[in-house]
Image: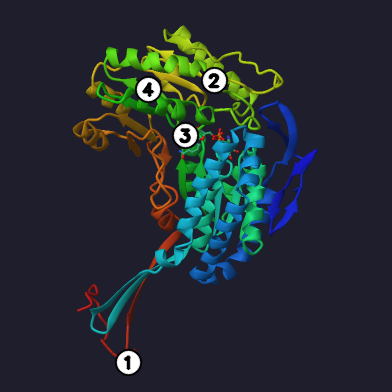
């Protein structure tokens, strides 16, 4: 049985305890490996390694640090298939979907290649007699990232390239459910020339996370995962004096106006609702057609397509979606579908109880379509994180906007329409962080930053892009007077530079 170990100071380590957890192939339900579960001892060792690596790494010029990112880009492009296979083996997503994850991660690596430009600072000459001011951004020190199962490669790479390019050293605590991608990321960085100890991987669950929060040498935490844990990490991380960004869960609505191209909208809903079995924080889980006629036409288009979804293991090149991550996730999703039925939703396509020949032990849930969902139903209020699309019929555009603005989550949303006025109004009024106009999954490209609103995020910074430079550095402003011989005498009033 493969044992997935921590990586501390460039060396694999099985840690100080025999705490282990099974890792599954979700398509077969078989245990494929065990992962070591870190405790305070492993976190401390990783922090010591990261602290030891920090002086040399932060003193390396930004251009040289960028060289590692340029090399990483080449390594990742060459090994994209290996990375995708590693993702799919423990996550279950299709190979093409995993390749998409790698492509989006590469955008962040490419942005980090330009770090020398992003760190170059500001300078003002003669702000007073002989006085100049310069502002620079310096690395924080040792920082940590805690990541979810659903993008085991992309989400760590939302964090690590920019954190390292800014001069920090890093502790990654990936999801214990699909941990192999984290070790592969470490190995890719090593192949790209990253010195040992700059990036360390500690596996585990709550004990490892709590040790990260408690460790006084960790300056900042980036977290991506569910909202309850995001809140927990934000509150406790801030109380421990750390800088924290914590991205949480989602419930993303897509509004379909009567003038929309309904074929285009149906295509968008199929991909955004069922791609990756709905296990994306930017998945569309609620379709909001405006008017009953729009709803009837949309549902007529969606029903046969949801029924015909091709579901299979990552090895099946025809598969449009794979299994969900675990038996517990399947049970939770099926229970939510049942609650929808009990509370009055109409099940047009029922994915409960799906079995696949040859893969009887896999964690399968079929595509599910619910109609006449209402805002008071559990299936609407909670994040499902599975292949379930709810149709909530809106009587008007204003009702749709108010509905979305009332929801606790505000990660992503979309509107499909041909009406520019409505689209513009939507973009302005909607209380959501990432908005698509005829774009169902508006994940910003790597030159912008990613982040939701409301309980989809805790903290002031979005992730990757320009926000990452601010999150992973702190500002230093130096005011200097030359020549040193100028004698101004003691000033007891507040200095005005005059
Ligand atoms: P999760 O919150 O269960 O786990 C995320 C991380 O937190 C993991 O590393 C896990 O080990 C750790 N963790 C879990 N329970 C903990 C506890 N009690 N105390 C301390 N740490 C704990 O999330 P998940 O199931 O892995 O991922 C799915 C969730 O992530 C969904 O809610 C999804 O919307 C969200 N997500 C959000 C974004 C975003 O950008 N907003 C992106 C991807 C996923």
Q: Is mark 3 within 8 Å of ligand 1?
A: yes
* Count of number-bearing discs: 4
Distance, label 4 to label 2, CA atoms, is 18 Å
Q: Tell me, for residue 333, which label it has, or none.
A: 2
Q: Tell me, for residue 287, which label it has, or none.
A: 4
If you read the primary sequence from the N terminus, does the residue marked by circle 1 or circle 2 appear first?
A: 2
Residue furthest out toward the right? 1
Image coordinates of residue 357 in percent, x first then y, are 69, 17
Which quadrant is the N terminus positioned in? top right
Q: Give neighbour class at mark 3: few <14, some 14-19, many 20+ (Cα, 10 Å).
A: many
Mark 1 or 2: the one toward you: 2
For residue 390, above or below residue 241:
above
Tell me the residue at 35%/17% (across/down): 298
Which residue has dot 3 on it?
A: 281
Of 90 and 358, the residue lying toward us = 358
Ligand 1 - quadrant of the structure image: top right
Which residue has dot 1 on it?
A: 485
Do the residues under discs 4 and 3 have CB atoms within 8 angstroms?
no
Image coordinates of residue 454 in percent, x first then y, are 36, 35
Relative to 391, 307 lies left or right:
right
Distance, label 2 to label 3, CA atoms, is 15 Å
Mark 4 lies on a secondary structure that is strand
Of 368 and 19, the residue lying toward us = 368
Image coordinates of residue 404 in percent, x first then y, are 32, 27
């Amino acid at each position: 049985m493969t044992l997935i170990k921590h990586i501390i100071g460039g060396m694999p380590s099985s840690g100080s305890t025999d705490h282990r957890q099974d890792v599954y192939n979700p398509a077969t339900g078989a245990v494929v490996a065990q992962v070591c579960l870190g405790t305070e001892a492993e976190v401390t060792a990783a922090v010591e390694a990261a602290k030891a690596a920090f002086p040399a790494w932060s003193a390396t010029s930004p251009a040289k640090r960028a060289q590692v990112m340029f090399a990483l880009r080449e390594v990742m492009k060459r090994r994209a298939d290996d990375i995708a296979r590693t993702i799919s083996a423990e996550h279950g997503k299709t190979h093409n979907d995993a390749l998409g994850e790698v492509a989006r991660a590469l955008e962040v690596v490419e942005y980090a290649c330009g770090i020398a430009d992003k760190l170059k600072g500001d300078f003002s000459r003669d702000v007073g007699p002989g006085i100049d001011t310069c502002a620079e951004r310096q690395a924080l020190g040792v920082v940590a990232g805690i990541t979810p199962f659903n993008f085991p490669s992309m989400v760590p790479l939302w964090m690590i390239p920019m954190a390292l390019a800014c001069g920090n050293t890093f502790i990654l605590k990936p999801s214990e459910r699909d941990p192999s991608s984290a070790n592969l990321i470490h190995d890719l960085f090593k192949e790209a020339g990253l010195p040992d100890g700059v990036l360390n991987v500690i596996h585990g669950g709550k004990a490892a996370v709590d040790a990260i929060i408690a460790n006084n040498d960790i300056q900042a935490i980036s977290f991506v995962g569910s909202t309850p844990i995001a809140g927990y990490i934000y509150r406790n991380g801030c109380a421990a004096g750390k800088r924290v960004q914590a991205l949480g869960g989602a419930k993303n609505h897509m509004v379909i106006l009567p003038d929309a191209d309904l074929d285009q909208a149906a295509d968008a809903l199929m991909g955004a609702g069922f791609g990756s079995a709905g296990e994306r924080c930017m998945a569309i889980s609620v379709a909001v057609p405006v008017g009953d006629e729009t709803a009837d036409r949309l549902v007529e288009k969606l029903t046969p397509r949801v029924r015909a979804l091709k579901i299979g293991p990552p090895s099946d090149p025809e598969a449009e979606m794979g299994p969900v991550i675990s038996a517990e996730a399947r049970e939770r999703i099926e229970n939510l579908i049942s609650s929808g039925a009990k509370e009055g939703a109409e099940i047009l396509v029922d994915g409960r109880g799906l079995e696949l020949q040859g893969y009887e032990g896999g964690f399968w849930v079929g595509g599910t379509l619910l109609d006449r969902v209402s805002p008071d139903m559990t299936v609407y209020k909670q994040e499902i994180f599975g292949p379930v699309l709810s149709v909530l019929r809106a009587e008007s555009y204003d009702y749709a906007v108010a509905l979305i603005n009332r929801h606790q989550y505000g990660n992503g949303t979309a509107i499909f329409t041909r009406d520019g006025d409505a689209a513009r109004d939507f973009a302005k009024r909607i209380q959501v962080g990432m908005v698509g106009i005829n774009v169902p999954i508006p994940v910003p490209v790597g030159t912008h930053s990613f982040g939701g609103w409301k309980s989809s995020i805790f903290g002031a910074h979005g992730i990757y892009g320009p926000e990452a430079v601010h999150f992973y550095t702190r500002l230093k402003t130096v005011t200097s007077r030359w020549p040193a011989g100028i004698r101004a005498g003691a000033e007891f009033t507040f200095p005005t530079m005059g």
